[in-house]
Amino acid sequence: MADGQSKPAGMLGHLPPWPRKPLNNSVIAMEQAYRQRKGLPELSDAEVEALKAGVPMPWEAGGAGGAAVSVAATAAAAEAAAPASPAAVAVAEPPSGASAGMTDTVKALLASYPKWNKSSVAAEQARRKRKGLPLLSDAEMAALAGEAPAAAAAAPVAAAPAAVAATAAPPARPAVAARPAAPGGPPPVTRQGAAVRYVGTPAVGTSKAAAAGGVATAGPEDTDIDRVRRRFVWSCVAAFLGAWFIAFFRFFLPRTLFEPSTVFKIGAPSDYALGIDEKWLQKYRIWVDRRPDRLFIIYARCTHLGCTPDWKPAEHKFKCPCHGSGYDDEGVNFEGPAPRPMDRAHIEIAPDGQILVDTSHLYSWPKGQPSQFNDPGAFLPV
């Protein structure tokens, strides 16, 4: 691309708009690589020199306050800002005024350790405080750290071309006086220029990269639907954990079967008429059988396999629905596979005059053995 060719403002690529600080070679090389990937025109030599010098590029003359800058002035400013070759690099001499901090103490320190920075100077100052030695002055600390005093900094600024000053560019950082070379070492190079900010793509994972990609660094926006979803998920988790917690403790509880009491009252003897009464069959599994001379309780369990027989009033007998065993109205077997009569429960009169039944104490009539139906407690005389 020829010098002076106009470009639209969008051709900046990743470069910051004018006004900007001088850029170093790494940033410019990164910009050239970016332009090659995107198919944009590469920077010309004149534009590269203008970026290094911190002045507007030729096609940016209109955006710098209306002052036109010629290509020759730009090249001259670039030549004045950067040395032509390593052989032409000059070692900055300390100005004569106050020796620019180059006292005997500074010279001795530089001779003992040529590489000083602000941290090492601060460490040296602290050591002198501990040892009670004379402290370094501001000029001496500046000389050790390689910083030029204000009087020496004014000279490079005054030597800048008048055409570059007309562009209203920010003043470049003055050249810093180089440290005297160590005995037998290479000559130090004068530091010149200003630190530049990063103009490429921010590193992935940093807050700057998130902001450049349009992602909020404080997290997503908390909306109503998100709160409802979170509440639902946490409710499900709490319900699941609660169910397992209850099941865990239920394992330690005894698994008991609650059955009706075996001792209970069924009323006075006068409440029952002659014959079979099925009032308590469902609750206590008994029949109340009243005879003219006695009252007894038949336990409703077939002696064959334990089924509950049915009372057949029309046939005047008990009939087992399981295997056909038959019993008369007193519970004595007369047909089917039943081996013996049905059992009778213990019965007595309670102090309040009611009949007290105990089904845990049964009277039976085993096959081929004496009957227990006439034992005390097996019936009540009426």
Image (tube, helix red, strand yellow):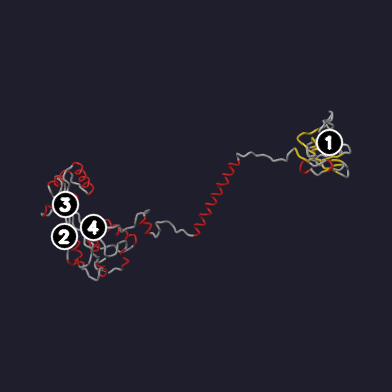
Is tag 3's residue or tag 1's residue first in the polypeptide sequence? 3
Is tag 4's residue or tag 3's residue first in the polypeptide sequence? 3
Q: Image quarter for residue 96?
A: bottom left
As measured in the structure, the alpha-carbon distance from the residue carrying label 2 to the one carrying label 3 is: 16 Å
- Which of discs 4 and 3 lies nearer the camera? The answer is 3
Amino acid on which disc 4 is placed: Ala
Amino acid on which disc 2 is placed: Ala
Marks 4/1 in contact by CB < 8 Å: the verdict is: no
Amino acid on which disc 1 is placed: Leu
Is tag 2's residue or tag 4's residue first in the polypeptide sequence? 2
As measured in the structure, the alpha-carbon distance from the residue carrying label 4 to the one carrying label 3 is: 22 Å
Determine the residue positioned at 52% across, 57% down: 228
Secondary structure, mark 1, is strand
Which residue is denoted by mark 3 in the rendering?
A: 139
- Which of discs 2 and 3 lies nearer the camera? The answer is 3
Q: Who is closer to the viewer here, 302 or 6?
A: 302
Amino acid on which disc 3 is placed: Ala
Label disc, if present, on residue 380 of the rendered structure: 1
Quadrant occupied by the C terminus: top right
Quadrant occupied by the N terminus: bottom left
> Which residue is at the far top?
369
Crowding around mark 3 (Cα neighbors within 10 Å: few <14, some 14 to 19, many 20+) is some
- Which of discs 4 and 1 lies nearer the camera? The answer is 1
Marks 1/2 in contact by CB < 8 Å: the verdict is: no
As measured in the structure, the alpha-carbon distance from the residue carrying label 2 to the one carrying label 4 is: 15 Å
Q: Who is closer to the viewer here, 93 or 308?
A: 308
Which residue is denoted by mark 4 in the rendering?
A: 194
Marks 2/3 in contact by CB < 8 Å: the verdict is: no
Which residue is denoted by mark 2 in the rendering?
A: 154
